[in-house]
Image (tube, helix red, strand yellow):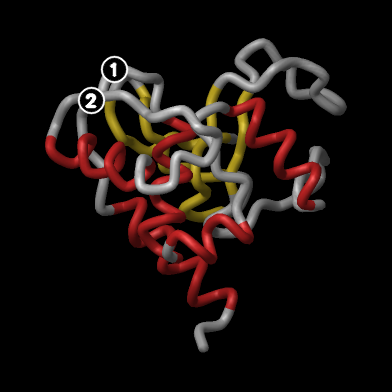
Amino acid sequence: MATEKEIRAEVVATAKEYIGATQGSKLHRKIVDIFNTVIPDGVKLLDTSYWCAGFASGVEIQTLGKKKAKKICPLSYNCNTIIKKAKKMGIFIEDDAYKPKKADWILYDWQDNGKGDNKGSADHVGIVEKVKDRVITVIEGNKSKKCARRNII
């Protein structure tokens, strides 16, 4: 049985496989198809959909398998639904002092000023690749319509 650290490393390795995938490409279609094997909210992900949440969910489904991913991840095509599910599962953390771990999901509100608890609506999600010093490197689907890294300071 794999340890949590090994599973987290596998999730990140899977996410890395998609770096450079553009919306409409074979790799993009692959993650859409993987997401649609579960359709967690009863809504299919389309080739034309915003796909950051579908990407994060699809990576978990691909890495963990459908049954385990559904059990431990807040799978969804929608960022705000991810938050609702994560809160219900007891795994949501809104704490500016929290140091993310590899494979954690980070949700963004582009209107958030970064001070105190965010009360706004989530616009985007990414998977933490690594944290070094004060820089968080995240792998995101649908970053300018492709899968790419973002550094958060």
Q: Is residue 62 above or below residue 150?
A: below
Q: Is residue 126 above or below residue 10?
A: above
Disc number lying in front (2 or 1): 1
Labelled pair 2, 1 in contact (Cβ < 8 Å): yes
Judge from the rendering whether residue 36 lies leftward or rightward of residue 71; answer left or right. left
Which residue is at 33% across, 36% downward? 148
Q: Which mark is residue 48?
A: 1
Kindly give the residue lying farthest to the bottom in the view shown: 1
Q: Which mark is residue 23?
A: 2
Count numbered badges in the picture: 2
Kind of residue at badge 2: Gln
Q: Is residue 18 above or below residue 5?
A: above
Which residue is at 23% across, 35% downward? 28
Kind of residue at badge 1: Thr
Give me the C-alpha separation between circle 2 and circle 1: 8 Å
Which residue is at 21% across, 36% downward? 29
Q: Which mark is residue 6?
A: none
Q: Earlier in the sequence, mark 2 or mark 1?
A: 2
Tell me which corner region of the image, top left, top right, bottom left or bottom right, holds residue 122: top right
Kindly give the residue lying farthest to the left in the view shown: 26
Closer-to-camera residue (29/131): 29
- Image coordinates for residue 135, horizontal then vertical, percent: 56, 44
Tell me which corner region of the image, top left, top right, bottom left or bottom right, holds residue 71: bottom right
Mark 2 crowdedness (10 Å alpha carbons): few <14, some 14-19, many ≥20? many
Query: Which quadrant: the C terminus?
Result: top right
